Image (spheres, rainbow, N blue to C red):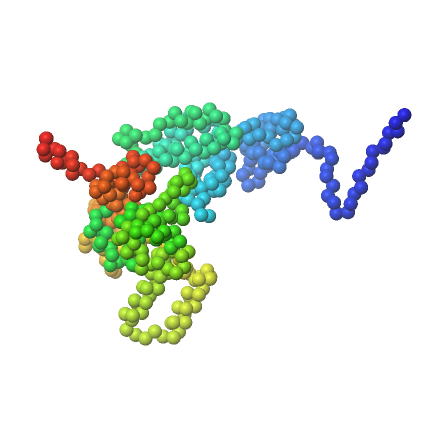
Amino acid sequence: MPVETPPQTPILVPGTPVQPQIRSHRTPSYRRHRASGQAVVTLSGQDHYLGMYGSRASRREYDRLIAEWLANGRQPLRASAVQLTVAELAIRYFRFVQGYYVKNGEPTSEVADIRLAIRRVVASYGRTAVGEFGPLALKAIRDGLVKDGLSRVFINATVGRIRRMFKWGISNELVPPAVLQSLQAVDGLRRGRSEAKENAPVRPVADEHVAAVEPFVSKQVWAMIQLQRLTGMRPGEVTIMRGCDLDTTGAVWEYRPSTHKTEHRDRERIIPIGPRARAVIEPFLKPDLQAYLFQPAEAEATRLAELHRRRRTRVQPSQAKRHERAMKRAARGLRGRAPSSRYRVVSYCVAIARACERAFPPPAPLARAEHETVAEWRARLTDKERAELAAWNRAHRWHPHQLRHTAATQIRKELGLEAAQVMLGHARADVTQIYAEKNNQLAREIAAKLG
């Protein structure tokens, strides 16, 4: 007969962790969360909030979760089995957003827009179960945005971002599929059929308004303005131009930005550089091909050198040493801020805005006096004067995004819509029509002959 071998006792080596063989049968307790005052239970290392501590509803939710957890073999519950709230869904979705909407190691502007949309939802329906969030709730949020005076386009985009959050929840089995289907029944606001305000479309800027700011900007900013006007590139493309991104082999150079707006759609962006644009770029070419062509540090150095040249008194040694120490500390990040190696879109826009303020000062009654502070000036203006000042600014101020519209309009007028589409890098001609205004001269000639 075979001899039964007794079970071997495992040999324990010092320093080796012992794996637990028996799972604890202790039932997780019903506890109070001190920070929020809610009841909470921890199942498989995950906290589940049950509602107000001590309430009957929280007790029933505790009993339900414990029963489902035990029936699941003491394994983590699927999120769909838990009454997930809108606030909990928003937290999980925003974690995904922070890792997804990133370009070159920096968050894109979409992150801030999604944060605003999520705040709207959580403020009103944070404690609502995701399965109970329906079209009426979405309409209520949309009506609140209208009352706050936001534009129709921004409201429609915000509603779309809210739908996108629930769509993400469905893809991760956090939201019932019927929720998104019901939310898609809410149509976007139509022009002229809602109380939402309409923003004025972006128009091309007149060339005389562009030329007026030249004395009030650095040569780097003026070069970027000229390049945008000649090529129709975006502000974010002209600010990151480097020598290594330029192909200078042919008569027409080619500029391939290291990053651009539609690269996540696997689209290549090639900007042709003609003779006039080449003449603008050539003075800024550098031996270091990785260096940005247009640098605020160079503009600041030029400005300080000009101030030094105009100075009538001798610079004191203590003042020179103090300035040198301040620049060293700023470069090390200890105090102050050293000039950046390249312009950002925001700093580029600010430089043009300040130049417009100097090139187009408002009339005397609306302008700020030299002895007035900004607060005193704003308090002095009446409502009528504020409206007049706003109208004056709209007529005389411009921003770099308008330069793209100006270039597109001129290209369409001289070479046609397809040429404008190719230069702007659009995949569809209907997008180009937003940037390039129609040439109505042909229509006028037809009307003069036939009408």
Q: Position of residue 171 (x, y in %)?
A: 49, 31
Nearer the observer, 340 or 254: 254
Residue at image coords 47%, 41%? 100
What x and y, as percent, mark residue 346? Answer: 35, 50
Residue at the far front in the pictured view: 250
Q: 283 or 164: which is nearer to us?
A: 283
Which residue: 28% across, 73% down? Answer: 312
Instruction: From the viewer's perspective, tell me whether residue 328 is left or right of residue 32.
Output: left
Image-based side of 235 in relation to 382, left or right = right
Q: Identify the image quadrant of the C terminus.
A: top left
Name the residue nearer the viewer: 119 or 106. Answer: 106
Q: Is residue 393 visible?
A: no
Residue 156 drawn above or below residue 395: above
Whether residue 15 is visible to the viewer of this picture, yes or no, is: yes
How far across and how far down the image is residue 405, in percent? 27, 43
In the rendered picture of this protein, how many numbered marks are placed on residues?
0
- Residue 389 is situated, as x and y percent measured from the top left of the image, at 22, 48
| Quadrant the N terminus occupies | top right
Residue shown at the point (25%, 49%) measured from the top left: 397
